[in-house]
Amino acid sequence: MMSVQGKVSREIRGHIFLIGLDRTTKRNAFDSYMIEDLSLALTEYENNPELRCAVIFAHGDHFTAGLDLVELQPKLADGVFNFHHDIVNPWGTVGQQRSKPLVTAVQGYCYTAGIELMLNSDIVVANENTRFTQIEVQRGILPFGGATVRFVQAAGWAKAMKYILTGDLFYAQTAYEMNLVTEVVEGNNQLIRAIELAERIAQAAPLAVQATLKSAHQAFLQSPEAAFANLQELLSPLLVSQDAQEGVMAMLQRRAPQFKGR
């Protein structure tokens, strides 16, 4: 493993990229260096054609206690989250948008920016004892990592507003019932399960996976009508790709396909 700022670990396992939050002495709370390091790790993932799926997890007992407001508050007004156009924003609000799939494993505290980070991933596996809170309003700010959009769309207006406006604590099962997490697992198995899912995604045709994400993101960020209008444009290149030919041949020969991403 290596790290740029010492706040995020990186490990490549075949086509899988493991990205670990590693500021355990502060319960993995995000300071500006950790935000920068996570952004750079996601950009590495985006730019490496051999990597097909990433997993974000956390070292230690907690996913993240959210933003380190002691360190960040003086910088927030200066635009600490103004990401450059070629740097992937972990929260997907500005900057370069992620085009590859992301699985997130959470445990312990998953507070504020942690909720917003997982809401910007595609699959979330939560330990059954994970605790969540969206408490920005109680700290005099707002959840500017996207919770006012994604939390509301996932959980519905009434449930989302209850937790966003009160900052009440809730647990993994409630998060699952509100469609904030994909699966809840027992024991300390959230990372094992997240890697299992990532490996299955990495076995699929990369071009098809990315096209599917692009269509879904377009429906979310623009409108369902915009996504419908773009389906043929996304499908046509796939039909003539080597991966599509391999997929058909593998089906006919009753074997596992070997996709190359071209």
Image (cartoon, rainbow, N blue to C red):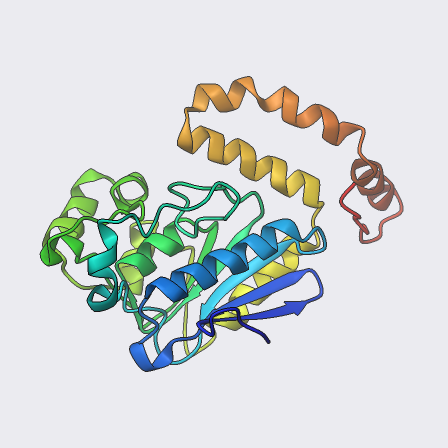
Q: Position of residue 121 (x, y in %)?
A: 45, 51
The x, y position of residue 46, in whole percent, is 60, 50
Instruction: State which quarter of the image contains the C terminus.
Output: top right
Residue found 52% across the figure and 69% down from its top: 4
Left or right position of 105 against 61? right
Q: Position of residue 242 (x, y in %)?
A: 83, 38
Q: How many badges with numbers are in the image?
A: 0
Against 5, residue 90 (above or below) is: above
Instruction: Between residue 202 and residue 49, name the one nearer to us.
Output: 49
In terms of image quadrants, where is residue 1?
bottom right
> In which quarter of the view is residue 199 placed?
bottom right
In-image side of 167 versus 124 (left or right): left
Side of 7 where 55 appears, left or right:
right
Q: In the displayed structure, would residue 196 be above or below residue 87? A: below
**Would residue 258 appear left or right of 170 to someone viewing this image?**
right
Identity of the residue drawn at 46% across and 68% down:
57
Between 208 and 140, the residue placed more toward the observer is 140
At x 20%, y 39%, the residue is 157
Q: Nearer the viewer, residue 173 or 25?
A: 25
For the point 73% across and 27% down, the residue is 237
Q: Is residue 235 above or below residue 249?
A: above
